[in-house]
């Protein structure tokens, strides 16, 4: 039995496969994505109330020839009641409502389409921005919470070869207003009962949609304040329920820690060794695994928030038992109780040559981490049949895969059957 085991700390009940293969990241079919921090477009969305902090809102009110207190009234419409239509601004003189709405609430997101999955508990929405750029959000209902996954950039410049968003490159950074509007729209959808089971409130926000949030730091920083500060400044979402996920922009992890908003930090690690992380995550050429884990640990020390390590399990590439052990060792070296690991089976992306790890291999990976004392939970993958899961957001109407289209058609057929049965 011992001959099956690898590594020194492997418990007797965990058996590694006899001869693990090593697949290295290779160039996938189609154009090779290039790492970039420079957006293809420079356009900036019209200024919106959600772009502004309270003093700037007061100033904008004065500039529009309105008394300062209008800023407070408008903020409450937006952040408490989630409404922007001029018809809802009943505490503003009737003659001014339309103009006020035009100035403070220019439409930033136009809904292109919704796709639903998981029996109506997941909705992926495609949005068109003022300049035609597209982004996606995913709204997910769980027992006891409703989570909205939002985008921080149109596209992404990080060029991770296993992620659909990374294949299309970076179109542009989103404005604070465009980020915050995704949240308001998600709240409106949840409150209007768009998810199965009826009206609900968005409780959790994850920056796990399109883009690298820390590559659009200034706008994301302001958006975090709008999300977390109580009304009339913001929505008043609990900081611990807001997750910022990064591929590893080390200096900005330190800035996030200093922001005084103890949000949850997720680090997309995917490999504990530079030999593999270098070809898998282009940014690793700048910031190595050890530096990244040090920054993650420092984040915990500064904020007291336990850090999540995201790890997409890719068959024969990063799912070896020795890597689970190395990951556990690197984490334990930096202390106990500061981190947990979220392995996630790789979601398929168009043209990808890689697949998710085998269930048995996944089990060994998880068991090895757990045996080393690392809290580990396999992440639930929502919406994979509508390309709504992690790494599948591509935001092009045409890019909807045949699989996603079929799943949607089936869901719609089921829905109309359900409706027929009800009638
Ligand atoms: N750029 C940020 C935010 C994106 S979050 C980041 O990298 O953290 C999206 C998460 O899904 C990241 O953890 C990302 O690494 C992961 N992911 C990307 N492609 C995936 C895929 N095909 N299957 C599973 N997870 C994937």
Image: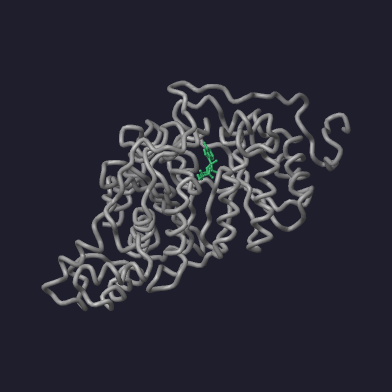
Q: Quadrant of residue 182?
A: bottom left
Is residue 46 positioned above or below 324 on the image? Answer: below
Q: Residue at x 51, y 67 (%)?
A: 238
The quarter of the rendered structure image containing the N terminus is: top right
Q: Residue at x 52, y 53 (%)?
A: 244
Q: Position of residue 249 (x, y in %)?
A: 57, 45
Q: Quadrant of residue 281?
A: top right
Identify the residue at the far left of this view.
95
Q: Residue at x 47, y 32 (%)?
A: 349
| Direction from residue 376 to residue 405 in the image, left or right | left
Q: Position of residue 261 (x, y in %)?
A: 54, 64
Is residue 315 positioned above or below 184 on the image? Answer: above
Identify the residue at the far right of this view.
2
| Direction from residue 150 to residue 376 in the image, left or right | right
| Direction from residue 413 to residue 286 in the image, left or right | right
Q: Residue at x 24, y 55 (%)?
A: 107
- Comparing 313 with 55, the one in front is 55
Q: Position of residue 55 (x, y in %)?
A: 36, 70
The quarter of the rendered structure image containing the C terminus is: bottom left
Q: How many numbered marks are there? A: 0
Q: Position of residue 321 (x, y in %)?
A: 74, 35
- Comparing 244 with 298, the one in front is 298
- Comparing 164 with 293, the one in front is 293
Q: Quadrant of residue 314?
A: top right
Instruction: Please say which color scheme the image uses.
Output: one colour
């Amino acid at each position: 039995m011992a001959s099956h085991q690898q590594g020194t700390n492997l418990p007797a009940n965990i058996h590694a496969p006899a001869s693990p293969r090593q697949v290295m990241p290779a160039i996938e079919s189609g154009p090779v994505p290039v790492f970039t921090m420079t957006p293809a477009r420079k356009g900036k969305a019209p200024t919106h109330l959600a772009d502004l902090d309270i003093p700037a809102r007061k100033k904008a009110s004065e500039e529009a020839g309105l008394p300062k207190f209008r800023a407070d009234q408008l903020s409450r419409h937006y952040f408490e009641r989630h409404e922007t239509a001029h018809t809802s601004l009943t505490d503003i003189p009737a003659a001014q409502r339309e103009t006020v709405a035009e100035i403070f609430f220019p439409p930033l997101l136009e809904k292109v389409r919704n796709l639903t999955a998981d029996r109506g508990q997941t909705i992926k929405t495609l949005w068109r921005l003022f300049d035609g750029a597209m982004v996606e959000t995913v709204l997910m209902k769980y027992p006891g919470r409703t989570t909205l996954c939002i985008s921080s950039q149109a596209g992404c410049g990080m060029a991770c070869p296993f992620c659909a968003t990374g294949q299309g490159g970076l179109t542009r950074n989103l404005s604070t207003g465009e980020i915050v509007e995704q949240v308001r729209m998600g709240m409106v959808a949840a409150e209007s009962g768009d998810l199965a089971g009826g009206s609900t409130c968005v409780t959790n926000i994850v920056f796990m949609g399109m883009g690298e949030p820390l590559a659009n730091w200034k706008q994301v920083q302001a958006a975090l304040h709008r999300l977390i500060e109580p009304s009339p400044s913001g929505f008043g979402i609990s900081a611990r329920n807001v997750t910022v996920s990064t591929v590893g922009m080390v200096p900005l992890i330190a800035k996030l820690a200093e922001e005084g908003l103890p949000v949850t930090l997720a680090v997309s690690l995917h490999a504990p060794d530079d030999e593999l992380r270098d070809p898998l995550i282009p940014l690793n050429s700048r910031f190595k695994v050890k530096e990244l884990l040090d920054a993650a640990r420092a984040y915990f020390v500064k904020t007291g928030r336990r850090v999540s390590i995201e790890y997409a399990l890719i068959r024969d590439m990063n799912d070896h038992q020795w890597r689970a052990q190395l990951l556990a060792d690197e984490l334990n070296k930096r202390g106990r109780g500061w981190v947990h690991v979220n392995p996630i089976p790789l979601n398929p992306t168009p043209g990808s040559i890689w697949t998710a790890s085998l269930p048995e291999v996944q089990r060994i990976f998880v068991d090895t981490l757990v045996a080393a004392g690392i809290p580990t939970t396999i992440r639930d993958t929502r919406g994979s049949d509508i390309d709504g899961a992690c790494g599948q957001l591509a935001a092009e109407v045409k890019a909807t895969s045949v699989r996603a289209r079929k799943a949607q058609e089936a869901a719609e057929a089921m829905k109309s059957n359900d409706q027929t049965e009800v009638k």
